[in-house]
Image (tube, rainbow, N blue to C red):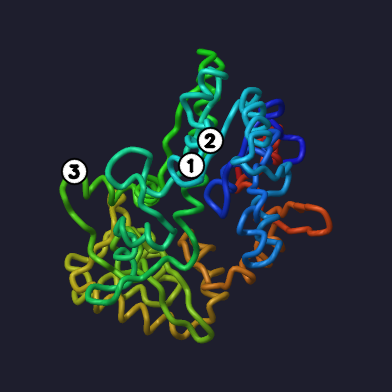
C-alpha cells in the first residue's frame, strides 16, 4: 500500500496515547496524512515503556513526535499554531484536559472552522459517566462483553486481547474519514465524540440491537457459533482442535460426507423428518442438538486437524485448525493470504499486517470467474 495515499496533504494533530487513539491516527498516517504526535515533555506515551519499543512503533510509525508541556506558555502557543493549520485533531486524554489549556473544540473552531475534532474517551463526552476512567477490560465488563463468552453459570470471561481499544481506534478513523469527506462539500469541520462503550456496542452490534429493542440478553453458549447450530462449534481432533462451521443443512450434509457419517442425516434421533440439504437456506436445527454434537465429536476425534480443515474446504464447509497467532501468520504468509508491511522508527523495525486490506488498481486476476 506504499503508493495508496488518499490522505496526502491532510494534517493531523495527535494528542493520543496507549492504543485506541494511536491506532486511529496510525491508519490516517498509513493512508498518507501528515500526523504530528504531541507527547508530554515529562514522559511521553506510556507505550514507549510498556511491552517494549516494538509496541510503540507498531502504533506510531510514520508520525512525527513533538514533546510539549502545555502548562508552559510557549509550548501552548506552539500547540495552538499547529491546531490553527490542522485538518484533524484527535484527543484521547481525559475529558476536559485540553479544554483547560485552551485547546478544546470551541476555541479551536473559532480559529479553524474546518477542523475535524475527534475526542476519544471511555464513556463519551456527555452524561453523568463522562469523567469515569476506563480501560479495555473495564469497558468489556461494563458493556456485557464479558458475559458473552463462556457458559451460563461460569465467571465472566474477558476477551484475550484489547478488542475494545482496537475497535475504538477503527471507529474513530472511520468517523474522521466521513467528516473529512463531508468537509469537502461544506468546508466546515465536525466535533466527533467517540467512546469505548460505543465502539464495544458496535462490536456486539446484533446483540446491542436485541438489547435495545427487545431487552434481551443473549445466552452464553461457550464456543458455539452465532448461528446456534450444534455443528458450529469447536471439536477435539487427534492432534488439537478445529472450529467447524456447518451452519446450514447443506453444509452439514457436506461435512457428514467428509466424516463418513452420511447416515446421521437420516437418523431420527437427530433429524425427524430427515435432514433436507436441498431446502431453502436456514440455520441448522436438530431434534437433539446435544446428541448430534456428541456424534460429530466422536467422528471428528478420528481426524488430524489440518487434514479435516483441507477436506472440509474442498466441499465448501468452513473449518479451521485452532492455531496460535504465530502459526496463523506463518501459514497465511506461505499461502499468500497475508502481506506484511515493514514499519520503522529509528533503529527499531516491526513487521505489521498492514491495515487489513490490500489495494490494487484492478482485480489481480483480471476479474475472470473461477
- Could you tell me residue 21's position as x and y percent? 54, 46
Neighbourhood count class around disc 1 (C-alpha, 10 Å): few under 14, some 14–19, many 20 upward: few
Q: In this figure, which residue is indicated by the disc labeled 3?
A: 213
User: Residue sitting at 51 percent across and 30 percent down?
Assistant: 117
- Give the Cα separation between the discs numbered 2 and 1: 7 Å
Please tell me which residue lies in front, 262 or 63: 63
Residue 278: where, in percent of width, then height? Answer: 32, 54
Name which of mark 2 and mark 3 comes first in the sequence. 2
The residue drawn where x is 62% and y is 54% is 45
Q: What is the spatial separation of the Cα atoms under label 1 and label 3, in whole angstroms? A: 36 Å
Question: In this figure, which residue is indicated by the disc labeled 1?
Answer: 97
* Residue for badge 2: 101
Q: How far is the residue under mark 2 from the one under mark 3?
A: 42 Å
Instruction: Give the left or right position of residue 267, taking residue 203 as reference.
Output: left
Q: Residue 215: give x, y in percent of width and height.
A: 16, 50
Q: Is residue 215 left or right of residue 206?
A: left
Q: Residue 347 sits in which quadrant?
A: bottom right
Amino acid at each position: 500500500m506504499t503508493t495508496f495515499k488518499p490522505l496526502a496533504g491532510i494534517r493531523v494533530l495527535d494528542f493520543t496515547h496507549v492504543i485506541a487513539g494511536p491506532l486511529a491516527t496510525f491508519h490516517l498516517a498509513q493512508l498518507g496524512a501528515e500526523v504530528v504526535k504531541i507527547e508530554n515533555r515529562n514522559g511521553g506515551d506510556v507505550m514507549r515503556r510498556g511491552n517494549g519499543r516494538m509496541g510503540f512503533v507498531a502504533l506510531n510509525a510514520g508520525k512525527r513526535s513533538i514533546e510539549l508541556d502545555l502548562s508552559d506558555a510557549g509550548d501552548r502557543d506552539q500547540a495552538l499554531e499547529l491546531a490553527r493549520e490542522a485538518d484533524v485533531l484527535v484527543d484521547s486524554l481525559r475529558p476536559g484536559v485540553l479544554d483547560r489549556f485552551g485547546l478544546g473544540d470551541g476555541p479551536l473552531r473559532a480559529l479553524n472552522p474546518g477542523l475535524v475534532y475527534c475526542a476519544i474517551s471511555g464513556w463519551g463526552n456527555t452524561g453523568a459517566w463522562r469523567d469515569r476512567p476506563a480501560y479495555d477490560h473495564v469497558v468489556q465488563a461494563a458493556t456485557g462483553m464479558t458475559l458473552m463468552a463462556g457458559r451460563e453459570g461460569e465467571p465472566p470471561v474477558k476477551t484475550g486481547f484489547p478488542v475494545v481499544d482496537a475497535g475504538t481506534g477503527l471507529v474513530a478513523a472511520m468517523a474522521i474519514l466521513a467528516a473529512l469527506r463531508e468537509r469537502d462539500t461544506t468546508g466546515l469541520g465536525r466535533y466527533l465524540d467517540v467512546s469505548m462503550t460505543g465502539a464495544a456496542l458496535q462490536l456486539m452490534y446484533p446483540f446491542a440491537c436485541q438489547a435495545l429493542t427487545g431487552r434481551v440478553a443473549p445466552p452464553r453458549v461457550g464456543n458455539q457459533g452465532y448461528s446456534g447450530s450444534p455443528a458450529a462449534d469447536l471439536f477435539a481432533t487427534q492432534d488439537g482442535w478445529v472450529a467447524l462451521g456447518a451452519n446450514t443443512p447443506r453444509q452439514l450434509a457436506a461435512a457428514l460426507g467428509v466424516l463418513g457419517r452420511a447416515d446421521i442425516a437420516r437418523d431420527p434421533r437427530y433429524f425427524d423428518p430427515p435432514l433436507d440439504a436441498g431446502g431453502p437456506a436456514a440455520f441448522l436445527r436438530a431434534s437433539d442438538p446435544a446428541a448430534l454434537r456428541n456424534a460429530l465429536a466422536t467422528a471428528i476425534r478420528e481426524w488430524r486437524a489440518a487434514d479435516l480443515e483441507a477436506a472440509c474446504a474442498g466441499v465448501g464447509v468452513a473449518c479451521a485448525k485452532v492455531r496460535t497467532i504465530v502459526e496463523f501468520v506463518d501459514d497465511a504468509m506461505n499461502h499468500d493470504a497475508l502481506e506484511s508491511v515493514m514499519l520503522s522508527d529509528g533503529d527499531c523495525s516491526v513487521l505489521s499486517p498492514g491495515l487489513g486490506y490490500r489495494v490494487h488498481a484492478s482485480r489481480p486476476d483480471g476479474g475472470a470467474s473461477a
